[in-house]
Image (spheres, rainbow, N blue to C red):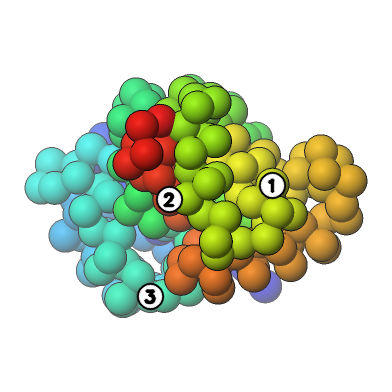
Amino acid sequence: MSVSIVIVDDHAVVRVGLATVLADRPDFEVKASVGTAAEALAAVEIHHPDVLVLDMRLPDQPGTAIVPDVRRLSPATRILVLTSYGEDRAVVEAVAAGVDGFLVKSADSQRLITAIADLVAGQPMLGEQVADALVRHLQAPGEATASMALSDRLTKRELDVVMAVSRGLSNREIGEQLTLSEKTVKNHISDILSKLGLARRAQIVVLVHEQAQRFGG
């Protein structure tokens, strides 16, 4: 089964380059390549792609502004933000919007291909620069207060997993850190999302950040 993809970027050269890179994978199929937010929503409604590769800066509105509409039109579509805008604030805004992955355009082609494959497999994709940016927003004192704020809703082990997720660690890395199997980590994350009323792993990062800010982090 092929992975259907819609590319959204305001630069035609970038769109062509991305489509060329993705064409190297025989199981990837680019259904549409568009340059505006309005065109992106139209393409999503028509194709219901497995993955939407979305630029943050579009001429008619920010890419992240269309995330709720994408979710409404095609709930199963995974959203990968790909941008040259790598400031910490942009990272937090993208994650807060509910995207499934975030890569800067300086990432190599294999990183992009791997990110899309991971998203389709249900693994959120946060690049190293994204993880670093999130960590800078979660300084140690903030983590402690955020942990205290969540302690009445989560078990100690779930809190450990939450803090590991907030640092951008993968399930495998969390398992190694906490001496758990990847399956156990995945189960913990599912339970955490349910208890906190969240839909996606990336939202855990935002919640910890918000709690840290609220309680003086």
Task: Kindly report which numbered mark, 2 or 3, lies closer to the viewer in this rendering.
Answer: 2
First reached walking from the N terminus: tag 2 or tag 3 = 3
Residue contact between numbered discs 1 and 3, judged by CB atoms under 8 Å? no
* SS for dot 3: loop
Quick check: 154 above or below 90?
below
Q: Residues within 10 Å of mark 2 (few under 14, many from 20)?
A: some
Residue under label 1: 160
Disc number placed over residue 100 in the picture, else none: none
Residue at the disc numbered 3 = 74
Q: What x and y, as percent, mark residue 173?
A: 78, 40
Say which of 104 and 201 sits in front: 201
Q: Name which residue type carries label 1.
A: Asp
SS class, disc 1: helix
- In the image, residue 100 sits, relative to residue 142, either above or below, namely below
Q: Earlier in the sequence, mark 1 or mark 3?
A: 3
Q: In which quarter of the image is residue 189?
A: bottom right
* Residue at x-position 38% and y-position 75%: 74
Residue at (47, 50) in percent of width and height: 149
For badge 3, the amino acid type reads: Ser
Q: Which residue is drawn at 40% across and 30% down?
A: 217
Where is residue 202? Give x, y as percent: 50, 51
Q: Which mark is residue 207?
A: 2
Q: Residue at x 52, y 54 (%)?
A: 150
Distance from Cα at disc 1 to Cα at disc 2: 15 Å
Q: Which three-letter amino acid code belongs to the residue tagged 2?
A: Leu
Report, in whole angstroms, how far the alpha carbon at label 1 lies from the one at label 3. Answer: 33 Å
